Image (cartoon, rainbow, N blue to C red):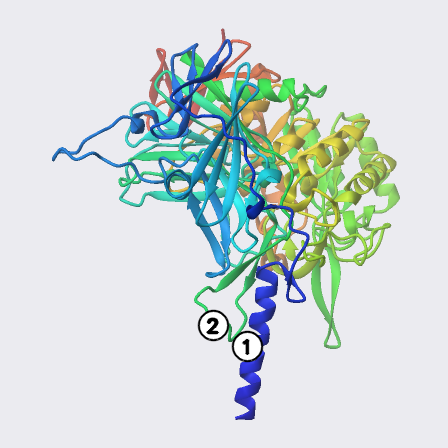
Amino acid sequence: MKKAVIKVIGIILVFSCMLSLLTGCKGGEKASLRTALDFSTLEYKNDALADGEICQNERFIMSWNDTYKQVVVTDKQSGEVYSTIPTEAMQVQYDEEGYEIENNVQIESPIIVYYYNSKTLSETTAFAALDAIDGGEIFGEVIPNGIKITYVFSSQEIAVSVDYKLNEDNFEISVDPKEIYDNGESFVAGVAVAPFLCSLKNDSDDSYFFIPDGSGALMKPQTIDMIGRQGSTRVYGEDITISDFTLTSYTEKINMPIFGKKQGDNAILGIITSSAERAYLNWDIGSSAKKYSSIYPFFRVRGHNIVKRPAGFVMSLAEIPIYDDYITEELLTVKYYPLSDEDANYSGMAKTYRKYLIENGQLSKSSQKQVGAAIRILGGINQKTFNFGIPSTKLSALTTVSEAEEIARYFDKKIDSDILISLVGFGQSGLDIGKLGGGFKISSKLGKKSDISSLTAFCKESNIKLFMDFDIIGFNKNGSGFSISGDTAKSFDGQTVYLSFYNNITRNGSGQDKYMLLERAKLGAAAKKAVSTAKNYGFNGVSLSSLSSIAYSDYSLKGAGVSGGISADVSEILRNTKNTDILTINPNIYAAGLSDYIAEAPVVSSQFDITRYDVPFYQIVLKGYVPMSSTSLNISVDYKTAVLKCIEAGIAPSFTLSFNYDNSFASSKFSSIPVSNFNGQKEKIVETVSEVNKALEKISNATISQHEIYENGLRVTKFDNGVTVAVNYSEKAVDYQGTQVDANNYIILEG
């Protein structure tokens, strides 16, 4: 009996602790740090809302539909109408028996609020159509160039205000988190903005959605079943500070905060212009019950994490979300750019986004020329050894510095074009995580100073661009001026964030080795140390793989919760290091536009079950501005297709290589090692580079003006210098403008 009583008390204590975490309570009292406004103090200005025009400018007219309580924007240029509800759904329709067809509640909801429910200990959704327009209240306030609508979710005691504004060539929708009200028991965790503004009626002809997954992907609004397919993926990749017990893994990530749709001669591009780091792209495709498909942004306004349900905790959920007391303060903004005629497609979306980046100082032309090939050379890995039964680790060489020079000399002799080489994992811990930046030093086990001098001198003489890669995010040992006790990123409860092993080749987490993240305030200092190290060794520049591709939260820095401000932080770092060449790896757009070279640029998408086509959108935006190379061909699933992808996008091939291979490396956590053997692939690589460069020499620094997909497997890329590349991915020959394109081959047409 005594044991049973102790067990019950234990469960009660666990339950109390969990409630303390989940409700933001400390010491049994409600936390006083919550910055969302108290619902009981809700104040608002209410201008009369009536059918008709709200405001207009030279391009747009904004109106209010009082029947459906929706904002409507008309594009004067094209005559197209955009609304927070599909325009067809605002027309009364009847079924076969003469009854009025009611829209699904989600269709008529201008926003969806995600809130924590203290009764279910889970995140719950509130739809504006049901819980504010019908079951609550809405208020309007005329503002400059638009209107502010406050949606009051009475049952949940939540209120969210949304600003709708007209700009010169776009209209925008924004939410100010500082104007969010809740009651502290049901508190707001996130907001989905205009979920059916970018929508298409199911089975619409000549229509698709665009999502920047990997290189880019198109989704067709085809009816699937009553429920359809719903999904969500985070802009700039998953926040690695959030625990993930589902083992969900995407092969690619979203590098750009944009989305869009096309229908006939009209299209629209959505650009998330603020709080992109906090955004997810959600999709709802093919539901026969809703009759419409859509893609839309969702923003997290509170930091959160996931914990496993404690043993003996009586509830059905296996995992429980916990939330930060604080709400984010940065505006959540999406700007919508209507496109028409020849720009009403993903090529037009790419050109519009490129223009946006240039005008906002996020993209400029690199002074560097396109290289013919990019080679990533792997240095060392830590392997377990046993001395008299006592386990230890030692650094084993995949490639020494002198062997890296041998690789460089071979390709310099065999390849008749410029080469870029980056050394990866040549620090003190090799590819494994140890001291920050590998100790900012090439391991003596991989090369002596004389070896390094010989390599750098040869590359300089041969005009080979030589970089050294530094992981300046993950570390698990003190050194180089960075401490695991004082310089680590923190979660919102003030605790150090611990993660499992980060693979800087595949960019996936796995294994049992624990590591920490560098606090965001120290990233600039770490980048300077990396640049200084590369210069002292005589390298052309520095490669910053993890910095350019990972967005993560750090609650030790104000405004850095929910990954906030990472794009501004990284942009500032890259601008401050422009006295040396910067190589980025699969970079997010805020790093890509400020790079001198991009390696491992995505050429495919994650190929979700609703993806119809992959498209080279990433390259359409950046080609001709920043020299690019593809993902490593020798670790691709389909080598030949990967080669054709390079030619289609007009970018250089990339390869990941090591000089030594031993069967003991086969069990390594680095999946690239077994297929990286230089000696087994060198002739094939030379042949591939020669083939790709036949196309590249004609389109070296040209931009892509148009890209088209044909149903027969043909893809056509048109460049601004008049060159056209037609690639045939089918198993039989096809014709393009009177010229035969053989199966799995390509042609180049000039002028």
Contact, CB < 8 Å: mark 1 with mark 2? Answer: yes
Q: Is residue 705 visible?
A: yes
Q: Is residue 266 left or right of residue 471?
A: left
Front position in the image: 61 or 661: 61
Locate residue 676, reporting x and y percent. Answer: 61, 45
Front position in the image: 102 or 703: 102
Which label number is shown at residue 504?
Answer: none
Locate residue 41, reporting x and y percent. Answer: 58, 44
Q: Secondary structure at mark 1?
A: helix
Q: Secondary structure at mark 2?
A: loop
Placement of 377 over or under 89, stated as above or below: below
Which label number is shown at residue 314?
Answer: 2
Q: How far is disc 1 from disc 2 in space, using C-alphas? A: 9 Å
Q: For the point 57% across and 81% down, which residue is it?
A: 9
Q: For the point 75% across and 77% down, which residue is it?
A: 388
**Location of mark 1 (residue):** 11
Locate residue 315, reporting x and y percent. Answer: 45, 68
Q: For the point 74% across and 50% down, which residue is it?
A: 556
Q: Amino acid at mark 1?
A: Ile
Answer with mark 1 or mark 2, whichever residue precedes in sequence. Answer: 1
The image quadrant that residue 109 belongs to is top left
The residue at the far bottom in this view is 1
Front position in the image: 548 or 464: 548
Q: Amino acid at mark 2?
A: Val
